[in-house]
Image (spheres, rainbow, N blue to C red):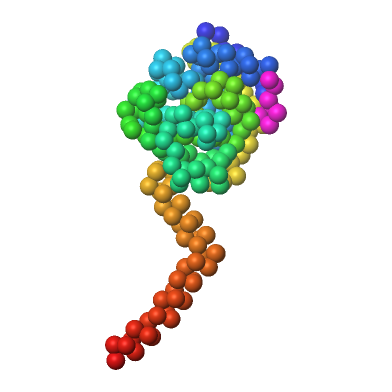
Amino acid sequence: MTVRIETIDAYNPDFRILEQAARLITKGEVLVCPTDTGYAFSANGLDPKAVARVFNLKGRSYSNPIHVAVSSIEEAGKYAHINEAARHLASRFLPGALTLVLPKKETIPAMLVAGRDTIGIRVPDNRAILSLAEMTALPLSAWVITREKPFRFATIINSLSCGMALCFLGYGALRQPERPRGLVPLFWGALCFLIAVVISLLKGGVIQRAFKRLRERTPSACKSAH
């Protein structure tokens, strides 16, 4: 298959090119699409054949799961169980260079997550892949080809093969991550949420008032004991 190269501005993507890319995604093809952390192999995460092609293109072991990019945390609810901790983190850090690891729903193919019960969810801070995810209404594989900075055209070309339907590039338009990138497993998310709640209570004076009442009662209890 001939590799096709299109130029797109990640900040203001061409709708015509996005439409072409969306059609290819729904047909099971694999694209190279810019994200906020690098260029990624993007395909329909619900299509096992497309997912297999992503694994094979880079020679990735099937024992390693692949994350997906979605257009919003609400869209993520179709593919993962979203709790309050995850929603709190999403409201603070997404879109952005953050991956939430959440319990997956049955719609997710086992191959995509290497047979695990969780899935990595991303909402990238990049208009190109966000628009593509929104237009297809699909979870797109977000396996970054390279994190080399600056993002070099030659590095991407060397990663391509005849299995590609389209090389979908945004020359000079990749947004560099503004926040630290990382994985947030469910228990860490819950811990962050609890810390945020405690901070909110401290700011509101709830905990201070509780300690004040406790100190007021303690002397009385001591006097009655004497």
Q: Is residue 8 above or below residue 88?
A: above
Main SS of the magenta segment?
loop
Extent of the magenta region: 9-15
The mark total stands at 0
Q: Is residue 186 above or below residue 129?
A: below
Q: Is residue 110 magenta?
A: no
Task: Give the residue furthest to the bottom.
Answer: 226
Q: Is residue 10 magenta?
A: yes
Q: Is residue 41 above or below residue 1?
A: below
Q: Is 10 displayed left or right of 103 in the figure?
A: right
Q: Nearer the viewer, residue 41 or 149?
A: 41
Residue 196 x/y as whole percent? 49, 56
Asked which quadrant contains residue 117, the reply is top left
x 45%, y 22%: residue = 45
Residue 171 x/y as whole percent? 66, 27
x 43%, y 81%: residue = 216
Task: Give the residue furthest to the front.
Answer: 224
Q: Nearer the viewer, residue 112 or 214?
A: 214
* Residue 53 in sight in this render: no
x 52%, y 14%: residue = 26
* Residue 115 in sight in this render: yes
Residue 136 x/y as whole percent? 56, 20
x 56%, y 25%: residue = 133
Indicate the quadrant containing the C terminus: top left, top right, bottom left or bottom right. Answer: bottom left
Q: Is 119 displayed left or right of 42 in the figure?
A: left
Task: Give the residue furthest to the left.
Answer: 225
Q: Is residue 110 above or below residue 215?
A: above
Q: Nearer the viewer, residue 67 or 205?
A: 205
